[in-house]
Amino acid sequence: GLLPGPGQRAAAKKAQAKLRGAAMANLRVALLLLVGLSCVAGLLPGAAPARGAAAGQQRAGSVTMAGAAALAKKTTVLEGVKENMDGSALMFCVRSEGLRVNELNDLRMKLPEGVRLQCVKNTLVNIAAKDFEQFNAEGLDGLLHYSNYWFFATEAGMRDSIKVWKTFTEESGRKESGEIVGGIFDAQVLDGKGVEAVSKLPTKQELMGKTALLLKALPTKLARSLNEAGAVRIARGLEQARGQKMVRAVKAASEKLP
């Protein structure tokens, strides 16, 4: 009489099944709520967005540091360009295409003292030239195309720097591709032929030497001219005297004749 009958056992199993179904339903609801809360948390300010902001700030900091490093490098290069321009009388450029590092090193060794060779970005050349009267030329933009190597030559080194470059192009088989693109002298933009013509001008030192020689020779030439002029006057006077004596002699002889 204490043991459940078949009807009671069936009812108990049915009740347990309902309980398990209710538990599963509650579990599914709980899971859905958790998922919903996670999605909402992603949209609202909280721990996760804070981590994202920190990562963004870190990336921004890296970009800022990289930009500062690039700016510092450009500033250093710009100062180097200005240093090369300072004291130079002529700057001219050639195309950098095809020039090898070992060839350029040999070329630098052959350049005259005080002449510098540097590959410079066009924007930096344009900025640096504005600080130097001899290179702040109207029309400089016409030379600032493609990639160029720039020669910075002192007045004394202009002629020899052109000779060194022309010899290099002939020996390396670059006579045509290595033509001088152009340059700047005395705030004037020149083409390749103009650069060569300027390089052949006498330097101030040479002009001073020639002037000194002329001044030294002037007194001697002047004295010689004066001496020559005096001798001519004396000869002319003697000739006149001779003529006058001859006239008097003829006159006297004619008076004695009957």
Image: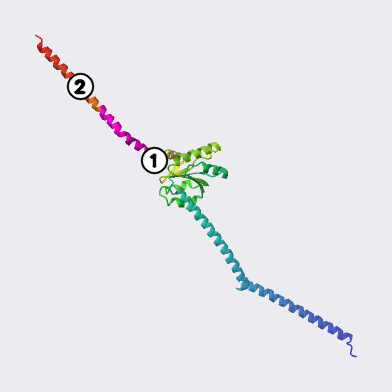
Q: Residue at x 11, y 14 (%)?
A: 252
Query: Mainly helix, strand or loop, the magenta region?
Result: helix
Q: Which mark is residue 205?
A: 1
Q: Which mark is residue 238?
A: 2
Taking depth in this image into account, of 13 and 257 the one nearest to the observer is 257
Residue 191, position as x, y percentages in the image: 45, 41
For label 1, the crowd category at 10 Å Cα-Cα, with few meaning under 14, some 14 to 19 and many 20 or more, is few
In the rendered view of the protein, which quadrant contains the N terminus?
bottom right
Residue 122, position as x, y percentages in the image: 49, 50
Name the amino acid type tagged 1: Gln
Vertical side of 1 occupied by 195: above or below: above
The residue sitting at the bottom extreme is 1
For the residue labelled by badge 1, is the local secondary structure a helix, a strand or a loop? helix
Taking depth in this image into account, of 90 and 37 the one nearest to the observer is 90
Q: Quadrant of residue 42?
A: bottom right
**Segment colored magenta:** 209-228
Vertical side of 58 occupied by 148: above or below: above
For the residue labelled by badge 2, is the local secondary structure a helix, a strand or a loop? helix
Residue 230, position as x, y percentages in the image: 23, 27
